[in-house]
């Protein structure tokens, strides 16, 4: 058992007095008073040691044998005890402070991990420190654009915001603790109303390398160095916990995101799930996943958007260059803002509603020169974007990109499968536009396109998206002309290798003008507007069945390796599709072709005439019909035999093909009767064309027997508006021409 110093001092005083009373001399009394003096000086310092020494001297004077040497010994005892006691007192004070620091650290290690998120952790700090005896004012300040906002404090403080100056501002700027022993000497000190403050300690709190808050302590007396050290270590422990919470949050969100993407069946389902997770986890209001489709960004999915004006933006899409999403697309860099109204590329509807905080991030697309999709998250109220949230969103976009790539490839497979199913149900003419539409939809960067199909040794436009197909239908390309446009050689074309032209590197319009009439391609084909072109040959065996052209009218860098890969994906299925379609078309054409003359038969005429009549009604142009009966054919057939008669019919067919104008469509009606459809032709033009046919037929003679023709004409709309009315009118006039002995009667 160790006796306390006051007991030792009082005991020594008693023993000294007792020795004197019992008659002991000075040498036996002095040691007890030296112990009294030393104990007092050790406990209370040198000044109290002197008091004890003089008190002991006074008491020694009461007994015989006192001398000045005793006083000297007492003073020496006081001095030596003071020196030793000072060291012990200093060690004791430090031990108390260290114990308090250990309590701070223990609290940080035991209580702080119970916080679920950053906000809850920061808000709890003032109460934790108050419970540990951190006297004075304790506050948590969060950086804002203007300075700092008070998140929590003990005791409560009337002041809610302060500028980014003073001790708080220094701690944020320097990123290290700032201690001011006397705030009266601090020029930037910001006094808090109602607080008596002498010293201030500001401790930055870090989260993943960024200061997210400042722990501020104020007192009416100074902090000891040991307290500063202990609180600094407490702040470091809090910072570690903040970073740990950020890591846990990121891992949880990424795991949930990956799981949701794995379950999703479609792009839209995956996008909706990802938006709901991110918006909710970050405490935001809404989000949209945009996808670049030519000149507009279309909303693949959205979450939390309710305002009518914003729903209209989602429905219409973002025009080229409007909105932060387009900025991210062009730069490839994420963008974060809490001051949306100041952005020049902002969407007017969002600015009108006062939205302030947005994040726009590119979703990586493998092989793409630019991200095809952009994630946008936001809220009305202003809020900072901590580094931990930025890192989280960047990681989420990488995860999202991988999941969407898988679903994109799946969607391509499904689209091609649907084309094969449609092949069994739809006519070829209806299939061409569908093939083109699927390609434009699924090849990244495409917004328009055309499909040229090999027919009769030349390539013709059979489908167009974004162009005037009627204006292009009259343009044909030979094999060499199409290879010139392709620009990569026959061998690569037969391998189905796509190629890309960019207006930034090649004069697209000039190349087009070398293969087709400029006046047509500049208007119907819009070649001067094309900024990028992807041309895909569609080969089968030893010939290229078609060329698929996909275009972007706004961005020279629209097509990348991902576009080429998607185009290659379509090459083989389209080749099979077109080959099967051609085979079916040949079978259908055989059923619609007269085997003797090679002209389309009456069944083909009925289909073609109905189509041309509907087109004439829709666009309001004239349409003429000629019904032709051969004169003198019966004599050739009866006198020279059926073989010569068949030869005569074949010669008539050759003459009709030779003399026909571009656009005229001759048919064998049956027996010795023929018919010709004249699209875009009024009666006067049809009469002139029919007279030319009649004169040419009159030049056909067989062993002195010559042929002739009687032709009856009818014109839409003056002679009728239905097929039956026009056919009846033309047939009646043909018989009238025969009766009157004239070649043509209209």
Image: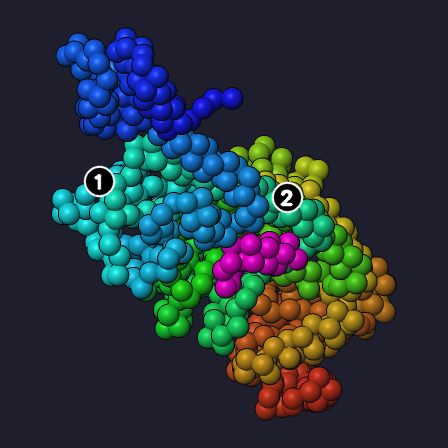
Tag 1's secondary structure? loop
Instruction: Answer few, some or many: residues within 10 Å of disc 1's Cα (few below 14, many 20 plus, some between 14 and 19).
Output: some
Foreground mark, 1 or 2, reads: 1
Quadrant housing residue 236: top left
Query: Going 44% across and 32% down the picture, which residue do you hit?
Result: 99
The x and y percentages for residue 105 are 47, 35
Horizontal side, residue 367 vs residue 655: left or right: left
Query: Going 68% across and 46% down the picture, which residue do you hit?
Result: 259
Pick the front one: 227 or 715: 227
Query: Going 30% across and 43% down the picture, which residue do you hit?
Result: 202
Pick the front one: 644 or 141: 141
Pick the front one: 545 or 666: 545
Determine which residue is flagged by label 1: 181
Is 548 situated above or below 104?
Answer: below
Is 14 situated above or below 525?
Answer: above
Look at the image and give the residue range highlighted in magenta: 269-295
Label 1 or label 2, whichever comes before in sequence order: 1
Pick the front one: 641 or 711: 711
Is 617 situated above or below 156?
Answer: below
The x and y percentages for residue 248 are 57, 41
The x and y percentages for residue 206 are 40, 40
Distance between the Cα atoms at labels 1 and 2? Answer: 48 Å
Determine which residue is flagged by label 2: 255
Q: Taking the image as drawn, is residue 430 in sight?
A: yes
Query: Going 52% across and 68% down the picture, which residue do you hit?
Result: 305
The question of residue 599 being in magenta is answered with no
Instruction: Answer few, some or many: residues within 10 Å of disc 2's Cα (few below 14, many 20 plus, some between 14 and 19).
Output: few
């Amino acid at each position: 058992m160790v006796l306390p110093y006051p007991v030792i001092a009082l005991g020594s005083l008693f023993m000294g007095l007792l020795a004197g009373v019992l008659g002991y001399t000075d040498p036996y009394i002095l040691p007890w008073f030296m112990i009294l003096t030393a104990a007092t000086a050790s406990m209370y310092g040198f000044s109290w040691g002197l008091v004890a020494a003089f008190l002991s001297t006074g008491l020694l004077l009461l007994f015989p044998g006192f001398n000045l040497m005793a006083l000297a010994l007492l003073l020496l005892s006081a001095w030596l005890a003071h020196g030793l006691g000072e060291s012990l007192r200093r060690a004791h004070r430090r031990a108390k402070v260290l114990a308090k620091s250990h309590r701070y650290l223990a609290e940080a290690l035991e209580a702080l991990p119970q916080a679920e998120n950053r906000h809850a952790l920061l808000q709890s700090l003032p109460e934790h420190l108050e419970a540990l005896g951190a006297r004075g004012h304790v506050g948590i300040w969060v950086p804002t654009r203007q300075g700092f906002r008070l998140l929590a404090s003990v005791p409560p403080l009337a002041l809610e915001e302060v500028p980014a100056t003073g001790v708080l501002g220094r701690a944020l700027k320097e990123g290290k603790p700032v201690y001011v022993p006397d705030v009266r000497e601090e020029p930037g000190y910001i006094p808090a109303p109602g607080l008596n403050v002498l010293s201030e300690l500001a401790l930055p709190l870090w989260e993943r390398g960024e200061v997210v808050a400042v722990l501020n302590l104020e007192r009416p007396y100074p902090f000891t160095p040991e307290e500063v050290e202990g609180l600094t270590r407490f702040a470091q422990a809090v910072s570690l916990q903040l970073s740990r919470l950020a890591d846990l949050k990121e891992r949880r969100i990424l795991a949930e995101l990956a799981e949701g993407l794995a379950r999703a069946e479609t792009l839209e389902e995956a996008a909706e799930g990802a938006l709901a997770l991110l918006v909710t986890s970050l405490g935001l209001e809404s989000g949209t996943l945009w996808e670049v489709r030519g000149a507009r960004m279309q909303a693949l999915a959205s979450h939390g958007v309710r305002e009518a004006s914003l729903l209209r933006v989602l429905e219409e899409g973002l025009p080229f260059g409007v909105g932060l999403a387009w900025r991210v697309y062009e730069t490839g860099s994420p963008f974060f803002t809490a001051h949306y109204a100041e952005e020049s590329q902002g969407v007017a509807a969002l600015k009108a509603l006062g939205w302030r905080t947005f994040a726009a991030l590119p979703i990586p697309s493998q092989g793409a020169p630019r991200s095809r999709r952009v994630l946008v998250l936001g809220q009305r109220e202003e809020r900072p974007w901590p580094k931990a949230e930025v890192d989280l969103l960047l990681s989420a976009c990488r995860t999202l990109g991988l999941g969407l790539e898988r679903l994109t490839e799946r969607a391509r497979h499904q689209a091609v499968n649907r084309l094969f199913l449609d092949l069994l149900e739809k006519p070829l003419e209806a299939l061409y536009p569908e093939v083109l539409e699927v390609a434009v939809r699924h090849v990244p960067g495409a917004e328009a396109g055309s499909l040229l199909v090999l027919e009769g040794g030349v390539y013709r436009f059979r489908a167009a998206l974004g162009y005037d197909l009627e204006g292009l239908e009259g343009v044909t390309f030979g094999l060499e002309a199409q290879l010139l446009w392709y620009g990569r050689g026959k061998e690569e074309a037969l391998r189905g290798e796509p190629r890309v032209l960019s207006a930034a590197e090649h004069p697209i319009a000039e190349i087009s003008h070398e293969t087709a009439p400029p006046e047509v391609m500049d208007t119907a084909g819009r070649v001067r507007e094309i900024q990028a072109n992807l041309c895909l040959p569609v080969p089968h065996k030893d010939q290229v069945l078609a060329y698929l052209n996909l275009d972007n009218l706004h961005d020279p860098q629209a097509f990348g390796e991902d576009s080429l890969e998607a185009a290659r994906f379509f090459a083989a299925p389209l080749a099979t599709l077109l080959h099967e379609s051609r085979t079916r078309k040949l079978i259908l054409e055989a059923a619609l072709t007269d085997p003797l003359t090679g002209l389309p038969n009456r069944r083909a005429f009925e289909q073609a005439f109905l189509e041309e009549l509907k087109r004439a009604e829709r666009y309001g142009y004239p349409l003429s019909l000629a019904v032709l009966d051969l004169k003198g054919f019966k004599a050739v057939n009866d006198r020279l035999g059926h073989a010569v008669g068949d030869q005569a019919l074949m010669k008539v067919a050759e003459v009709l093909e030779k003399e026909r104008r571009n656009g005229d469509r001759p048919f064998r009606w049956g027996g010795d009767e023929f018919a010709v459809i004249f699209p875009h032709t009024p009666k006067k033009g049809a009469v002139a064309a029919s007279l030319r046919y009649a004169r040419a037929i009159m030049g056909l003679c067989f062993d002195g027997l010559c042929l002739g023709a009687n032709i009856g004409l009818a014109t839409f709309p003056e002679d009728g508006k239905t097929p039956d009315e026009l056919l009846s009118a033309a047939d009646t006039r043909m018989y009238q021409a025969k009766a009157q002995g004239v070649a043509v009667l209209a």
